[in-house]
């Protein structure tokens, strides 16, 4: 298979590219390195079947050529990370909406399958967890910048589903819940790399708000597996499917597990949302996916446990220190 991955140098895109290359597929990768980085894909350059193009998705001519060459398109290019969204709302809205429109338009000429990545953010302030794909989207007012991300992704979903209904352009829409793993950067505010990094450095772990808000963290390898299974079944075409873990942990609980896995003596410090983001920032208290539909369509549930995820992230951030730590731990377990 020849796959085009937009946003292929991003965190999830680079893991998807790696997986496809390892199984023998050819990968066309398009990324403008706005939030992705060469670091993420440097180790993939050795594959002859990998071709990368450092161009924005707005380069319509290149996008069209690459779409024509591909058998399937994974559209992952997007503005991500709550901090980026709060700081650069124009870029968020434009990238998310225009990018998806260009991809669908190009794919539709030859009805190439498009997998498009949406987000659990679209459920907004809905409190009825677990979230089922047909649940109401409960967004805040347009005066609060945070909701522009959810609204722009919801529009992407409408567009993709409309292309399917009206033009029989095959699409699979996935709502990705918190996805974590090696190569995710804390630069855009994501909690897992930020807290693990702080624990390894011995600086205070910054828990925002009360720390009672919860999330479910899914290892990126499981996310990639779910994506590949979904695009392999015709039953997922025209559907919206949650992808994530349903193991829920509060953020202060996460900070505790991180401190213990990394044997860190860092204290935990609580920072009000107003300071962490912007005045009036609204967070989501809980965010848990229903995985019924994913299980039905892809016959898959995420496998990786939270401690394993934390170990993998720590190993990536500080390979030496963590290897020593794992060795000590194994020796201690053996002695027990
Ligand atoms: N968070 C935190 N400390 C940090 C970064 C994030 O407590 O240094 C919180 C954030 O306010 C949210 C949760 O962790 O409640 C998850 O944040 P992230 O940005 O990773 O993902 P989100 O679920 O908000 O998209």
Image (cartoon, grey):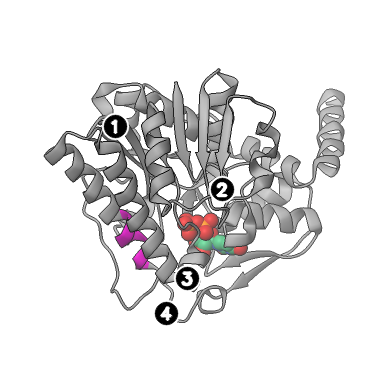
Determine contact: label 3, label 4, CB under 8 Å: no
Chain-order first, disc 2 or disc 4: 2
Task: Count all numbered tags in the image, as a single digit.
Answer: 4
Confirm or reject: label 1 Cβ below 8 Å from ligand 1.
Answer: no
Which residue in the structure is indicated by mark 4?
A: 280
The residue pinned by badge 1 equals 293
Question: Which type of secondary structure does the marked residue at label 4 adopt?
Answer: loop
Residue 218 visible? The answer is: no
Instruction: Estimate the spatial distance between the alpha carbons at disc 3 and disc 1, rounded to whole Å.
Output: 34 Å
- Magenta stretch contains residue 259: no
Q: Residue furthest top?
A: 24
Check the image and report above or below for 123 versus 134: below
Q: Could you tell whether 328 is left or right of 286 in the image?
A: right
Pointer 3 and pointer 2: residues touching (CB < 8 Å)?
no
What number is the disc on residue 88?
3
Residue 65 position in % (x across, y down) = 40, 38
Image quadrant where residue 291 sits: top left
Q: CA distance from mark 3 to mark 4?
A: 17 Å
Q: Is residue 40 left or right of residue 118?
A: right
């Amino acid at each position: 298979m020849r796959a085009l991955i937009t946003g292929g140098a991003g965190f999830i895109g680079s893991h998807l590219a790696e997986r496809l290359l390892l199984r023998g597929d050819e990968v066309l990768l398009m990324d403008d390195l706005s939030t992705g980085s060469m670091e993420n894909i440097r180790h993939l350059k050795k594959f002859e079947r990998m071709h990368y193009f450092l161009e924005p998705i707005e380069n319509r001519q290149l996008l069209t050529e690459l779409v024509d060459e591909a058998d399937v398109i994974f559209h992952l290019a997007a503005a991500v990370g709550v901090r980026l969204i709060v700081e650069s709302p124009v870029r968020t809205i434009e990238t998310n909406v225009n990018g998806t429109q260009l991809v669908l338009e190009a794919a539709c000429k030859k009805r190439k399958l498009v997998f498009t990545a949406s987000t659990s953010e679209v459920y907004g302030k809905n409190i009825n967890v677990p979230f089922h794909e047909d649940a109401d989207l409960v967004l805040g007012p347009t005066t609060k910048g945070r909701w522009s991300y959810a609204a722009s992704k919801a529009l992407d979903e409408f567009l993709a589903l409309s292309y399917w209904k009206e033009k029989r352009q095959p699409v699979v829409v996935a709502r990705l819940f918190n996805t974590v793993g090696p190569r995710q950067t804390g630069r855009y505010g994501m909690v897992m790399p930020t807290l693990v990094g702080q624990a390894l450095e011995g600086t205070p772990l910054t828990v925002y708000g009360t720390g009672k808000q919860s999330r479910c963290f899914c290892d990126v390898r499981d996310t990639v597996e779910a994506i590949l299974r979904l695009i392999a079944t015709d039953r997922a075409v025209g559907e919206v499917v949650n992808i994530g873990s349903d193991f829920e942990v509060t953020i202060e609980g996460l900070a505790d597990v991180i401190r213990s896995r990394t044997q860190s003596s860092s204290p935990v410090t609580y920072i009000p949302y107003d300071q962490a983001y912007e005045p009036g920032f609204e967070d989501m208290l809980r965010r848990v996916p229903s995985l019924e539909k994913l299980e039905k369509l892809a016959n898959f549930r995420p496998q990786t446990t939270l401690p394993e995820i934390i170990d993998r992230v720590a190993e990536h951030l500080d390979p030496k220190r963590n290897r020593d730590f794992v060795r000590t731990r194994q020796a201690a377990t053996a002695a027990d």
